[in-house]
Amino acid sequence: MWEIRHRKAFYKELSKLPAAVRGQIEEVAFSDTLKEDPFGKEKLERLKGYKEFYKMRFGNYRVGLKIDRKEKKIEFRRALHRKDIYRYFP
């Protein structure tokens, strides 16, 4: 079982997103299916040049995650528009 954490910045940015996108992200970020197998059906993509940093795409928005495979921890870090995410994440 994987442990899921959410940073304060993630909550703050999530609250500012459009309702439709926010609903899609909340469905994934707070679901139990991610705890069982984060690399299964989810739309995770590893960031080039980083071993532990991943992104998820939701239309024009991206969610930045840090996944520690040894400790089995998933940390949701940022939720921003695609033009801004790579400026602030990782």
Image (tube, rainbow, N blue to C red):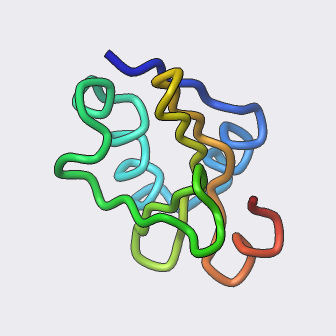
**Residue 90 shown left or right of residue 71 in the figure:** right
**Residue 59 shown left or right of residue 68 in the figure:** left
Q: Residue at x 49, y 79 (%)?
A: 60
x, y percent for residue 55: 51, 62
Depicted 46 relative to depicted 23: above or below: below
Depicted 27 relative to depicted 31: above or below: below
Quadrant of residue 30 within the rendered picture: top left
Q: Disc count in the image?
A: 0
Image quarter (top left, top right, bottom left or bottom right) of the C terminus: bottom right
Image quarter (top left, top right, bottom left or bottom right) of the N terminus: top left
Outermost right residue: 88
Outermost left residue: 41
x, y percent for residue 54: 52, 58
x, y percent for residue 40: 19, 46
Q: Residue at x 64, y 63 (%)?
A: 50
Quadrant of residue 35 within the rendered picture: top left
Q: Residue at x 46, y 18 (%)?
A: 3
Depicted 49 relative to depicted 50: above or below: below
Task: Pick the residue in front: 89 or 80.
Answer: 89
Depicted 18 relative to depicted 22: above or below: below
x, y percent for residue 71: 53, 21
Q: Residue at x 82, y 65 (%)?
A: 88
Outermost bottom residue: 83
